[in-house]
Image (cartoon, rainbow, N blue to C red):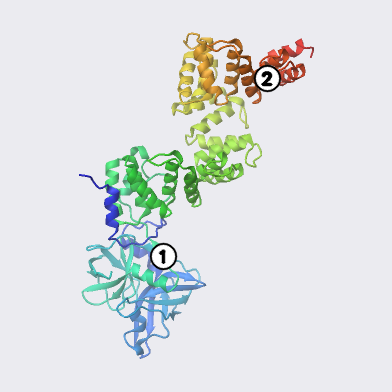
Amino acid sequence: MERTSIAAQVRLYFIAMLASFLTSTGHCATSGEDLALDLRGNVVRVSAPWENGASYDGFGFIVGERSGFVYIVTADHIVRGDAADRISRSPSVTFSQDVGTEHKAELLATRLQPGEGDIAVLRVRSPAALGWRRDIVSSAGVRRRTQVWFIGLERDWFVPIQPGMVNRVEPAGTIIAEGLNVKVGTSGAPLISDSGVVGMVVVDAGAYVRSTPIDLIERALKDWNYPWQLSSAPPPVLECDRRAAAPADTGRNSDVPGVEFDKIDAAKAVEACTEAMKTYPQSPRFAFQLGRANSSAKKHVDALYWYRFAAERNYSSAQYNLALLYANGDGGLQKNEAEAARLYRLAADQGHASAQANLGYMYRSGLGGLAKDDAQAVRLYRLAADKGNAIAQSNLGYMYRNGLGGLTKDDAQAVRLYRLAADQGNTSAQVNLGVMHREGLGGLAKDDAQAARLYRLAADKGNAAGQANLGGMYRDGLGGLAKDDMQALRLYRLAADQGNATAQTSVGNMYSQGLGGLAKDDTHAVRFYRLAADQGNAFAQVNLGVKYEQGTGGLAKDDSQAVRLYRLAADQGNAGAQYYLGGAYEQGRGGIGRDLNEAKRLYRLSSTQGYEPAKNALKRLGE
C-alpha cells in the first residue's frame, strides 16, 4: 500500500485549521501569564457614560496607529449598550502607563450586524511616548483545554495567576472558557493563551467567559479600513527548536543555540517539528525547521515543500536554503541560477548575511542572469562582512587585494579581512592570509612558518589550495619544515584530485623529474600538464609546450602546438613562456616567420622578471 508522506499528512491537517498568517521573532514569552503581564501596555481601560445617565466600564486593546491616532478595539455593548439611550457619546480611555489621565475617545460608526460579533472601535489621539507591542496574536489553534488568561478586572490591569481553560469553540469561532474569575467590567479585555492573544472577552458574568475570536476582529478591522498592525506572537520554545533550529538562523528562538546540520537526529527532529506544525500551522519558523529535519533525513520532496512554505511567508533562512538547492541543483531540483539569485535577493533584502555573500558572488561572476558587477559584489560583501560573515570577509579581502569593484588596492585591508575570516575557520582566508605572510605583504613581515601553519589549517579541512601550497613548502623545505618530496607529492595528489591546477602541474613536474618516490614518467607528466593547461595554468601550458617541442611523453613533435601553448602562457605574463616564444620567433619555428624584433621584445619581458635564459639570449643578440 502506498504511504502518504508526513508533509502530505500535515497539509491535510491544515485544511481544518484557522490561524494568522503573520509572524515575528521579536519577543519570546514563556507562558500565557508572562505574555499577559508583558501586554498590559497594550490594554486600556474604557469608561462609557451612556445618554440615559448610566455608565459602563470595561477594557480594550490597541490594534494600530494612523496619522497621530491610536485605534482601540473593545466590546460593542460597553459603548453602545442594548438600547438607543445607552450609546456613549463621550467615551474615554486610560492607558496603563498613565492611570491618572483619561483621554477623550471617538466612537467610530462602524459595527457588525446583530449576532455577527460584539466589536466596536475607538479612536484617540496618541499620547506622547506611547509604547505597545505588535507581535501578540496567537498563531496556534484554540482547542478544548487550551489554557487562557486575561488582562483587566475591576478597573485594574489585573492578570490572574491561575489560568482558565477553553471548554469549547463554537462553529462560528466564539471561544467559551471556564475557570476564569471575571466580573462585570472585564468585557473588552484580551483573552490570552501561551501562544498569544486568541480573542476578546464579550460576556463577563456567570460560570463561563465568551470571547470573540481574534481572527474575526482582524477581518472586521481590515474590512472597515482601520489600521491593523498586530502580528503573530513568536511561538514558545518547543522540542522542534531544540532538535532542528539552525545556529545561523536569525529567526530561531534566541533561547536555543541551534543544531549543526550534521548533528541533527533526523527521525526525532521530523517527529518534533511535525507536531509543532500541527500546533502552529502557519509558523514559518517551524516550517523551516521541519524542512531542515526532512533534508537531514534525505526526504527531499518533504524538505522542499516546507522550505517553500516558509519562504513564501518571507522567512529569510528558508529563502536562502531554497536558493542553495537551486544554485547547486540539489534536493531533486534542476539547477536554476536565476531562481537562486531571486531567492538570495529576497533573503539579502532582509539582512540575511549568507544570502548577501552569495548574491555578491553571483554579481562578481555574472551568474543567474545578472550582469557582472564588481561594485555590487563589493556592496553586498561589505554588508555581510559587517555582520561577521566569514565568506564575505574573505571575498571582500580578495577585492581589496586586487583593487576590484571600485576599491583602491589595499593589502593592509585585505590582511585585516582575511584574518577576521581565517579566525572563524574559513579555509580560503587561511590560504590567502598564508600567502600574505609568505610574501610579506599588507604590513606583515615575511614569515614562512606562519604561512605553513595557515596552509596546514586549510589543508587539514580539505582545501585544495592549502594542500597545494603546503606541498610546495615541503618540496622546498620552507617554514620550518624538513624537505620532503614524498609529503609534497601526497599533498599535491590530494589537491590534484580536486581539480587544483597548481597541484596538477606540480604532480606533472614530479613525474617529469622522477621525484617523491616516482619513477620518471613523461607520459604521466603530460597527462597532468594537460589537465592543468586546460584550466589556463600558465606553468602547465609552458611545460606541455616544451613536451610538444621535444616530442616526449607520448607526443609527436609539434612546434605549432608548442607555440600555441607558449603564447597562451606568455599572454599571462609567464617569463618562461615569453622566453620560449621569443626563441620560436628568433628561429622562425611553429608556423611563424622569423622576427628578431619580436624575439627581442619577448626576451626583454622575460628578462625584466629575472629569467636568466632570457638575459643570456639578449646578450647573445648584442643587447
Q: Position of residue 168 (x, y in %)?
A: 22, 67
Q: Position of residue 187 (x, y in %)?
A: 31, 76
Identify the element where label 1 is drawn: loop
Residue at 51 percent of width and 18 percent of height: 528
Would residue 556 appear left or right of 45 to someone viewing this image? Answer: right
Amino acid marked by disc 2: Gln
* Count of numbered circles in the view: 2
Q: Is residue 451 above or below residue 547?
A: below
In the rendered image, the quadrant that contains the C terminus is: top right
| Residue neighbourhood size for the residue with mark 1, other residues' Cα within 10 Å, grouped as few (<14), some (14–19), many (≥20) | some
Q: Are marks 1 and 2 in contact (CB under 8 Å)?
A: no
Of tags 1 and 2, which is closer to the observer?
A: 2
Identify the element where label 2 is drawn: helix
Q: What number is the disc on residue 125?
A: none
Amino acid marked by disc 1: Leu
Q: Nearer the viewer, residue 400 or 588?
A: 588
Q: Position of residue 113 (x, y in %)?
A: 34, 79
Q: CA distance from mark 1 to mark 2?
A: 71 Å
Nearer-N-terminus badge (1/2): 1
Any part of residue 132 in sight:
yes
The residue pinned by badge 1 equals 230
Would residue 186 appear left or right of 503 to someone viewing this image? Answer: left
Q: Nearer the viewer, residue 430 or 169?
A: 169
Q: Is residue 515 above or below residue 262?
A: above
Any part of residue 179 in sight:
no
Q: Position of residue 130 (x, y in %)?
A: 47, 69
Q: Is residue 125 above or below residue 356?
A: below
The residue pinned by badge 2 equals 578
Residue at 71 percent of width and 14 percent of height: 588
Q: Is residue 185 above or below residue 160?
A: below
Q: Nearer the viewer, residue 420 or 545?
A: 545
